[in-house]
Amino acid sequence: GRKKELLALSGGKKVAPVPIEAALAASPLVAQALCFGEGRPYIVALLAPAAPALAERAAAWGVSPEAVGSDARGEAAIAVVVAGVNAHLSRPEQVKRWAVLPRELSVEHDELTPTLKPRRDVIAARWASVLDRLYAKGAA
C-alpha cells in the first residue's frame, strides 16, 4: 500500500484518497473504490461493482451482471454516485474520471491483503491499461 495516505498531484496539491474512497464505496452500487493520481494532474478512480446491486440491476435491464458497468444505464448510475461525492469535495479532490472494473477486488487475485486492505501497487500494476486510458482521454 502507501506509507503515507496522501496523493501528491502534479500541481503540488496533496489529496487524502481514503475519505474519497469511503464516500464512493458508501453507495450500494460500489463495493470498493480506489483513487489514483500520484504525480498526475487530477484524481481518477477505479470502482469495483457491488455484486448484489449489479445482479439486481442486470436482471431489471436484461443484461448480464458483467455488462452492467459498461452498459449506458450502469455508467449513468455510477456517474450519479461520483457526482454526488464530488459535490462535497474541493476541486483538486474531485474524481475527474473513473472506470468500473469487471469484478470486485479479491485476496485470491492478490489485490487485497488477508485483512482486506487494498494493495495499491498491485492494483495499479494490474489495471495500468485502464488507468492510462483514464488519463489519455484528455485534460479534465
Image (spheres, rainbow, N blue to C red):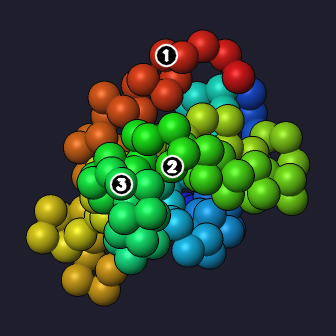
Instruction: Tell me if 68 is positioned left or right of 81 in this view.
Output: left
The residue that label 1 is drawn on is: 136
The residue lying at 75 percent from left, 49 percent from top is: 83
The residue lying at 36 percent from left, 54 percent from top is: 62
Separation (CA) of disc 3 from disc 2? 12 Å
Q: Quadrant of residue 129?
A: top left
Under circle 2, the secondary element is helix
Expressed as whole percent of the image width and height from the top left, the position of residue 41 reads: 66, 26
Instruction: Tell me if 36 is positioned left or right of 43 in this view.
Output: left
Separation (CA) of disc 1 from disc 2? 22 Å
Under circle 3, the secondary element is loop
Q: Closer to the observer: label 3 or label 1? A: 3
Instruction: Tell me if 102 is positioned left or right of 38 in this view.
Output: left
Q: Closer to the observer: label 3 or label 2? A: 3
Q: Residues within 10 Å of mark 2 (few under 14, many from 20)?
A: some
Instruction: Tell me if 90 is positioned left or right of 59 in this view.
Output: right
The residue lying at 50 percent from left, 66 percent from top is: 30
Q: Residue furthest bottom?
A: 115
Q: Are marks 3 and 1 in contact (CB under 8 Å)?
A: no
**Viewer-proximal residue, 68 or 106?**
68
Quick one: label 1 or label 2, which is nearer the N terminus? 2
The residue that label 3 is drawn on is: 62
**Viewer-proximal residue, 67 or 11?**
67
The residue lying at 49 percent from left, 16 percent from top is: 136
- Numbered label tally: 3
Q: Is residue 3 above or below residue 12?
A: below
Q: Closer to the observer: label 1 or label 2? A: 2
The residue that label 2 is drawn on is: 74
Q: Is residue 3 above or below residue 44?
A: below
The type of residue carrying mark 3 is: Gly
